[in-house]
Image (spheres, grey):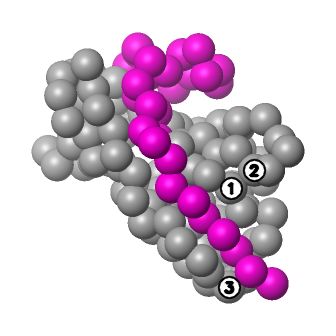
């Protein structure tokens, strides 16, 4: 089992930056793809960024591409999401998730470990 704890969320003005962290403990972190999902009020949870087990491949949703960067440090059992040029529409609860696989999946079903979420609020 992998336990995930997100941190780094908060209230930021539009145009600002934020770095989210997801600290993992437990088993098999380095063998798992990792992802960040977000859920805004009234919307479905969506995949915004993913990274495979080695960090050699990444995925970004079109809405965040060019502004968000996912990275991981397997030695520290941590995955990060650097968010730049924040927009009000980025406001959501952001969740870290660990996959069953080494490879990035697009569905919530692909991920069997989830963090508690961290709130990102962007003011205009």
Instruction: List x then y, in percent, for residue 64.
Output: 70, 56
Q: How many marks?
A: 3
Q: Is residue 30 visible?
A: no
What segment carries the magenta color? 96-124
State the residue position of label 2: 40
State the residue position of label 3: 13
Taking the magenta stretch, the answer to whether it contains residue 106 is yes
The quadrant in which the C terminus is found is: bottom right
Taking the magenta stretch, the answer to whether it contains residue 55 is no
Per the image, label 1 sits on a secondary structure element best described as strand
The residue lying at 80 percent from left, 63 percent from top is: 89
Which image quadrant is residue 44 in? top right
Q: Are marks 1 and 2 in contact (CB under 8 Å)?
A: yes
Which comes sooner in the sequence, label 1 or label 2?
A: 2
Which comes sooner in the sequence, label 2 or label 3?
A: 3
Q: CA distance from mark 1 to mark 2?
A: 4 Å
Which image quadrant is residue 43 in? top right
The quadrant in which the N terminus is found is: top left
Per the image, label 2 sits on a secondary structure element best described as loop
From what the image shows, is residue 29 above or below residue 19? above
Q: CA distance from mark 2 to mark 3?
A: 17 Å
Instruction: List x then y, in percent, for residue 38.
Output: 65, 46
State the residue position of label 1: 92
Q: Are marks 3 and 1 in contact (CB under 8 Å)?
A: no
Is residue 107 left or right of 55 when viewed as pictured? right
């Amino acid at each position: 089992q992998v336990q995930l704890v997100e941190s780094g969320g908060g209230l930021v003005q539009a145009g600002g930056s934020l770095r989210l962290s997801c600290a993992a403990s437990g088993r098999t972190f380095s063998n798992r793809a990792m992802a960040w999902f977000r859920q805004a009020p009234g919307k479905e949870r969506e995949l915004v960024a993913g990274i495979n087990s080695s960090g050699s491949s990444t995925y970004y949703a079109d809405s965040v591409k060019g502004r968000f960067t996912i990275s991981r440090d397997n030695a520290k059992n941590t995955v990060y999401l650097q968010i730049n040029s924040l927009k009000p529409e980025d406001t959501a609860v952001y969740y870290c998730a660990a996959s069953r696989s080494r490879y990035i999946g697009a569905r919530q079903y692909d991920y069997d470990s989830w963090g508690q979420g961290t709130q990102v609020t962007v003011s205009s």
